[in-house]
Amino acid sequence: MEKFRLKKDFVDERSELTKCPVCDTYVHQQESFVCPRCNKSPLCRKHRVPGRRECSSCVVDLKRKELNVLRGQEESIRHFLKFLQFIFLFSAVIYIALNLGIAEFVEILQHSLLPTYIMYFSIIPIAGYILFFIILYNQRGKVTDMELQIKKLEVRR
Ligand SMILES: [Zn+2]
Ligand SMILES: [Zn+2]
């Protein structure tokens, strides 16, 4: 009886142990998990990311993709800021031109509504610039945060 039990335990132990495909260490079936994204199994707990179902390699891949999107958005904001700078400079030049009386010689400016609204034309890009600068600052924070998360996860791989 005693001998039989010992043998059974030994068999169970053998069948429950499997190799982790990532780090090649033996892992208990109960302590392992399957990644729903890359279908790798049985993965040992080292590759588990708290709060995620995917393995750490997959989480890094997903975060890298998110990071690329965030960087793309950051680039767009930078381009838009440059555009606002251009609008501001453009309206500033016209404003100066009007104040110096050069406009009197420029027929298009003489009869247009531009002189009346020129102040608004320069205030809007300034306000927009401040607003989008804050958005850019916020975006930069998100990018740095994501880079830090990826760095931390890469250690687990
Ligand atoms: Zn492993
Ligand atoms: Zn995975």
Image (tube, rainbow, N blue to C red):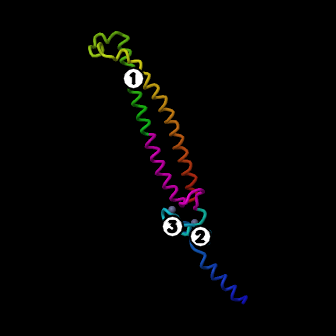
**Residue that label 2 marks:** 25
Tell me which amino acid carries mark 2: Thr
SS under mark 1: helix
Which residue sits at x=41%, y=18%?
A: 119
SS under mark 3: loop
N-terminal of the pair, mark 3 or mark 2, is 2
Which residue sits at x=38%, y=27%?
A: 86
Label pair 3/2, CB-CB below 8 angstroms: no
Q: Is residue 113 above or below residue 125?
A: above
SS under mark 2: loop
Query: Disc 2 versus disc 1: distance between alpha carbons?
Result: 64 Å
**Dominant secondary structure (helix, strand or loop) of the stretch shown in magenta:** helix
- Give the class, few, some or many, for how many residues have Cα within 10 Å of label 1's Cα (few <14, many ≥20): some
Q: Indicate yes or no: mark 1 CB to ligand 2 under 8 Å.
A: no
Which label sits on residue 110? none
Return the x and y of residue 151 as percentages of the image width and height: 55, 51
The quarter of the image holding the C terminus is bottom right
The magenta stretch spans which residues? 47-74
- Give the class, few, some or many, for how many residues have Cα within 10 Å of label 2's Cα (few <14, many ≥20): few
**Residue that label 3 marks:** 40
Left or right: 45 in relation to 6:
left
Q: Is residue 135 above or below residue 105?
A: below
Q: Indicate yes or no: mark 3 CB to ligand 2 under 8 Å.
A: yes
Tell me which amino acid carries mark 3: Lys
Tell me which amino acid carries mark 1: Leu
Task: State yes or no: residue 139 in magenta.
Answer: no
Query: Disc 1 versus disc 3: distance between alpha carbons?
Result: 57 Å
Return the x and y of residue 68 as percentages of the image width and height: 45, 48
Return the x and y of residue 39 as percentages of the image width and height: 49, 66
- Give the class, few, some or many, for how many residues have Cα within 10 Å of label 3's Cα (few <14, many ≥20): some
Which label sits on residue 89? 1
Which residue sits at x=41%, y=35%?
A: 79
